[in-house]
């Protein structure tokens, strides 16, 4: 009876109707059915292990959710034929078996809900190639979907809503196609491809909210992702390892706390029209010899961390063609011998530090690229590092191109506009060949080549450079046919070896100091006068009496006030003695502040800077506050850059380094903090009249910091200790806060506050003034909660704070 209908009821009925009729169990119906029959299952829960071995149709008579296949153990549903299974709920309970198993067949599975605690939600093996549509897997105990053993098939509009391990696992030479599928809440990778011969294709899919890597390709597997999204993972967005191959087209990888895309061990990645954004570490990191990434028309932007957007190292290679990298700390870092990056027709902008960094023997090739709004356009850092920049433009940077420590790049037809310091800066044995390059609108020099570096300049030109077009130090570079706009004086640099004449063109200006060329000349310089003249106070500086009054008004700190006033008096009288033609003491103005947190160190540092500005000692007197994270980089060479940049921001003011002892940890190992200290010591000596440095931290820890470098202690004139506030002083701080915000303390609140500050724990985490302010804020919140329950509070009630508004002691 071909094409018959087998009805199944979940009752105790004993009726038996040959093939067309009602059966006591699904197993009996399956046994009676012939190829092509339809089994329509009435609602109910069936505690059976079903095995479908005929090309029949098995469906829920009353639609999705009405039929549950839920045996106590084993595989709930096994399909070994080209059957059609529709709208069933499959519930397995065996953590050693799959809930739904497809073996060696090509069935159609539609609208299934696999809600299980099994080893695998859906497993496809033995060469099976099912078509799976609109199916959902919820398996918090194991894998979501597993395709293995040369199997494949098509998965359309399917969803893994939870998986205790990987969401979708493809291995053993399997080759499925995924269309519009979603994976979320997996405790492993969202999609994992493993093993030689394994190839998966995903179109319009989404992987998100997984506790691992989003997409993971390894061990010679390959994948093709088109129009897919990967986001909100706890691990990397996409990882490739050990000869993996992956292509991404029109994909979006975003909100990744680690690396957005990470490649290692000879893997190959091709990205086309793909966006990488909001990542915590590298947007694209490429490691190891033979590893390669090719990006075309891609965007990498909005870094959330402190790492380079693109990282290429250990002999790897990367190609960026028509790409955009923006809003990142550093854009492209290429390091290690054999590593290479080729960048063509790409835009790099809004870079907080260095756009292109080349170090440790790596090379880059940039053609027709545009770099703008960066601290440094390109930095070739050390011996063996080089490559070519051709027809590139670099706009609005502090320094256009830096070449140091024996690096030897080639720059052809490159244009640097509007740099704050120099267009091209070469020092410390750097070389470089510059042909047809131009610098326009520099606020420093056009070409600034110091330390006798032997660069070669051919047909270069400078225009409108504030300090001069060319500044060379002997023996200097070799130049040929280089020109300027003739705005400065022309000078000939003596030759020290045979060759063409070397000329330099510059404006009359003070001696330059490399990256910080705009800083004032110091008394230690050979051409400097015996005593540096005082500067006129900045136009926006407050009167000294007003600043000193604010200092005196600070609660407590009597010892600090005495120390600061004595130092200010010494500076002020010394200035008057110089004006009278007398010898004057030259006190070192750099200070050490020691004491617990919240004792006013930052506030005093700010006022100290303002006072020095009123005396004409500092140009502006502003405060730049930094900590270890602002000075120490995560990779070689970045620490010196950050320290120099922080020093430059503080030029004319105070550089305040909080918790400075963190730069010299007890077990430093390969820690880069010591590099920050060494850089800082050199800058403090070279530019002693330009910046006042104040280092601050706990007393004992600061003693260790001062001993970390032989030159550190000698750079600071004195140490000022900030004592902890007494309970009475803490009470005064709260009273001042209340008055400022138009609150009042009731008669007994003051006494309660005093007792509170006596009793509060004074451990290392105690914040002194910060604790007082936090206590006041907590009182205001509790006051608001109390009054919110009063329909019409009086004016007095809106102001008065009572003892019950005090927060509980921790």
Image: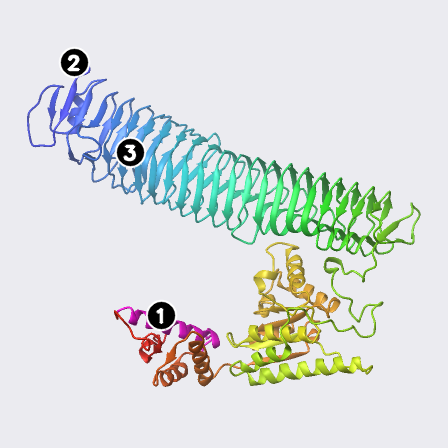
Label 2: which residue?
1
In the rendered image, the residue lying farthest to the top is 1
Is label 3 in a helix, a strand or a loop? strand
Q: Is residue 620 left or right of residue 113?
A: right
Spatial CA distance of label 3 from label 2 is: 30 Å
Label 3 vs label 1, nearer the camera: 1
Q: Residues within 10 Å of mark 1 (few under 14, many from 20)?
A: some
In this rendered view, identify the residue nearer to me: 382 or 22: 382
The answer to if 769 sits in the magenta stretch is: yes
The answer to if 92 sits in the magenta stretch is: no
Tag shown at residue 781: 1
- Residue beneath the point at 29% across and 25% down: 80
Tag shown at residue 100: 3
**Residue 710 x, y percent position in the rendering:** 70, 72
- Residue beneath the point at 50% across and 75% down: 598
Quadrant in which the N terminus appears: top left
Q: Residues within 10 Å of mark 3 (few under 14, many from 20)?
A: many
**Residue 782 x, y percent position in the rendering:** 33, 72
Spatial CA distance of label 3 from label 1 is: 56 Å
Q: Main secondary structure of the magenta part?
A: helix
- Residue beneath the point at 64% across and 58% down: 642
Q: Which residues are magenta?
A: 762-789
Tag shown at residue 698: none
In the rendered image, the residue lying farthest to the right is 498
Say whether disc 2 or disc 1 marks the residue closer to the N-terminus: 2
20 w.r.t. 586: above or below: above
Viewer can see residue 363? yes
573 w.r.t. 322: above or below: below
- Choose top left, top right, bottom left or bottom right for residue 614: bottom right
């Amino acid at each position: 009876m071909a094409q018959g209908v087998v009805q199944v009821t979940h009752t105790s009925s004993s009726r038996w109707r040959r093939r067309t009729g009602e059966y006591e169990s699904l197993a009996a119906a399956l046994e009676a059915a012939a190829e092509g029959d339809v089994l329509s299952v009435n609602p109910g829960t069936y505690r059976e292990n079903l095995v479908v071995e005929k090309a029949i149709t098995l469906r829920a008579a009353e639609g999705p959710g009405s039929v549950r296949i839920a045996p106590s153990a084993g595989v709930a549903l096994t399909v070994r034929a080209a059957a059609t299974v529709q709208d069933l709920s499959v519930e397995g309970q065996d953590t050693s078996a799959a809930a739904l198993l497809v073996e060696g067949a090509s069935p159609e599975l539609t609208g299934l809900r696999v809600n299980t605690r099994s080893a695998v939600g859906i497993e496809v093996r033995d060469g099976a190639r099912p078509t799976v549509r609109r199916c959902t897997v919820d398996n918090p105990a194991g894998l979501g979907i597993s395709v293995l053993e040369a199997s494949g098939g098509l998965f359309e509009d399917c969803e893994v809503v939870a998986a205790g391990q990987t969401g979708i696992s493809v291995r053993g030479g399997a080759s499925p196609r995924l269309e519009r599928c979603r994976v979320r809440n997996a405790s492993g990778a969202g999609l994992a491809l493993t093993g030689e011969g394994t190839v998966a294709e995903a179109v319009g899919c989404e992987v998100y909210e997984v506790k691992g890597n989003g997409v993971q390709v390894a061990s010679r597997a390959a994948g093709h992702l088109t129009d897919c999204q990967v986001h909100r993972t706890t691990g990397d967005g996409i990882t490739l390892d050990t000869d993996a191959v992956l292509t991404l087209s029109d994909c979006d990888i975003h909100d990744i706390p680690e690396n957005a895309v990470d490649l290692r061990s000879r893997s190959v990645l091709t990205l086309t029209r793909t966006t990488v954004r909001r990542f915590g570490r590298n947007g694209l990191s490429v490691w190891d010899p033979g590893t390669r990434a090719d990006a075309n028309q891609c965007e990498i932007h909005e870094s959330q961390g402190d790492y380079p957007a693109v990282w290429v190292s250990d002999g790897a290679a990367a190609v960026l063609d028509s790409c955009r990298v923006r809003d990142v700390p550093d854009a492209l870092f290429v390091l290690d011998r054999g590593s290479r990056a080729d960048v063509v027709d790409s835009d790099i902008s809004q870079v907080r530090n260095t756009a292109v960094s080349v170090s440790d023997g790596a090379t880059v090739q940039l053609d027709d690229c545009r770099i703008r709004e960066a601290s440094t356009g390109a930095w070739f850092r050390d011996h063996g590092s080089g490559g070519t920049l051709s027809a590139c433009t670099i706009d609005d940077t502090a320094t256009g191109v830096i070449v140091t420590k024996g690096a030897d790049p080639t720059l052809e037809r490159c244009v640097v506009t509007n740099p704050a310091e120099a267009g091209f800066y070469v020092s410390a044995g750097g070389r470089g060949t510059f042909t047809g390059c131009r610098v326009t609108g520099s606020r420093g020099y056009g070409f600034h080549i110091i330390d006798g570096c032997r660069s070669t300049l051919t047909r270069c030109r400078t225009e409108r450079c504030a300090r001069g077009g060319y500044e060379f130090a002997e023996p200097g570079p070799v130049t040929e046919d280089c020109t300027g706009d003739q705005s400065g004086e022309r000078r000939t640099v003596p030759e020290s070896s045979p060759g063409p004449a070397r000329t330099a063109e510059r404006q009359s200006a003070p001696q330059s100091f490399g990256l910080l060329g705009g800083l004032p000349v110091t008394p230690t310089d050979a051409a400097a006068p015996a005593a540096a003249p005082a500067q006129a106070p900045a136009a926006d500086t407050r009167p000294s009496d007003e600043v000193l009054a604010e200092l005196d008004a600070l609660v407590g700190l009597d010892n600090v006030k005495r120390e600061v006033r004595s130092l200010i008096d010494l500076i002020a009288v010394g200035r008057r003695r110089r004006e009278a033609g007398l010898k004057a003491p030259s006190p070192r103005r750099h200070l050490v502040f020691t004491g617990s947190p919240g004792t006013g160190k930052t506030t005093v540092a700010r006022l100290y800077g303002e006072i020095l500005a009123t005396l004409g000692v500092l140009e502006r007197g502003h405060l730049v506050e930094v900590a270890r994270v602002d000075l120490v980089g995560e990779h070689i060479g970045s620490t010196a850059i950050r320290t120099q940049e922080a020093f430059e921001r503080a030029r004319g003011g105070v550089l305040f380094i909080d918790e400075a002892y963190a730069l010299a940890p007890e077990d430093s190992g390969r820690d880069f903090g010591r590099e920050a200290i060494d850089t800082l010591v050199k800058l403090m000596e070279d530019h002693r009249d330009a910046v006042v440095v104040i280092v601050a931290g706990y007393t004992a820890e600061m003693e260790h910091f001062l001993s970390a470098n032989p030159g550190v202690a000698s750079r600071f004139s004195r140490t000022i200790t900030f004592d902890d506030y007494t309970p009475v002083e803490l009470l005064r701080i709260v009273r001042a806060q209340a008055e400022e915000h138009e609150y009042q303390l009731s008669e007994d609140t003051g006494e309660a506050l005093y007792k509170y500050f006596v009793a509060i724990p004074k451990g290392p985490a105690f914040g002194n003034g910060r604790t007082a302010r936090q206590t006041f804020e907590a009182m205001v919140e509790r006051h608001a909660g109390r009054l919110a329950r009063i329909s019409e509070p009086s004016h007095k009630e809106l102001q008065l704070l009572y003892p019950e508004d005090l927060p509980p002691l921790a």
